[in-house]
Amino acid sequence: MDTVISLIGRNFGILAIDTISPRSIFIMKKDLNKCVEIGKNKYLIVSGLPGDVSQFTDFIQKSVQLNSLKTGIPFSTHSVANFVRKELSECLRKNPVKVNLTILGFDDSIGPSLYFIDYLGNLQRMNYCVQGHASLLVFSLLDRHFKKEMDIKPAIGLLVKCIGVLKNRFLINQVGFLIKIIDSKGCRSVGIL
């Protein structure tokens, strides 16, 4: 039931995350933040079973920090994505976790990058990504309107269109979407729609 919509533009990455925590037919929490900082200008957005999400994100966050402290070199977004994929594929063989991840980061040398990793450990670099059942409705809109090298205002407008489609056509009422922008200055929240 989790929905994450993310895309990259000219010098930024932007994402919209639903803020509810559902359990069966009930909404347990309406102000959940599913975005975890795992390094400078690198964020992990996780959806899945609440216990797996909490345990796996804590493990990844602390492991990335420990490796950065040991080596003295910060991980790039590409390195973080491959590290997470390796850990998730190892968990698949030992103790499977049901989590889907989006990694959005900004590196000074490369610029913005977006990676999607599913619960089986498949890693894919993308220009835009949607997680959850909402992808059935939103991908067609992103296919039609997404342009490489978008500026911030058209990207926010595209996210607002996607959220409007979900509010009109999606069966589940997702109360709010937290919109965040990640660029060279860091992460800033635009607000909740």
Image (cartoon, helix red, strand yellow):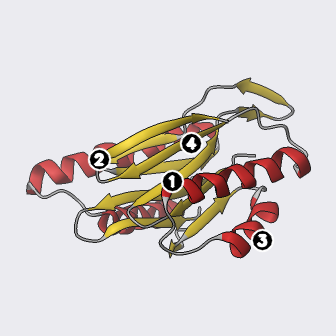
Q: Bin the neighbour count of mark 2 within 10 Å (Cα to Cα): few under 14, some 14-19, many 20 and up.
A: few
**Spatial separation of the CA atoms under disc 1 and disc 3:** 18 Å
Secondary element at tag 4? strand
- Mark 4 or mark 3: whose residue is earlier in sequence: 3
User: Is label 3 or label 2 in front?
Assistant: 2
Looking at the image, residue 91 sits to the left or right of residue 77; the answer is right
Label number found at residue 179: 4
**Which residue is denoted by mark 3 in the rendering?**
140
Query: In the depicted view, which residue is nearer to us: 187 or 91?
Result: 187
- Kindly identify the amino acid type of the residue bearing the numbered disc 1: Ile
Looking at the image, residue 131 sits to the left or right of residue 107; the answer is right
Q: Residue at x 51, y 49 (%)?
A: 45
**Which residue is denoted by mark 1 in the rendering?**
14
Q: Is residue 103 above or below residue 185?
A: below
Q: Residue at x 58, y 37 (%)?
A: 51
**Which residue is denoted by mark 2 in the rendering?**
185
Q: Residue at x 26, y 48 (%)?
A: 40
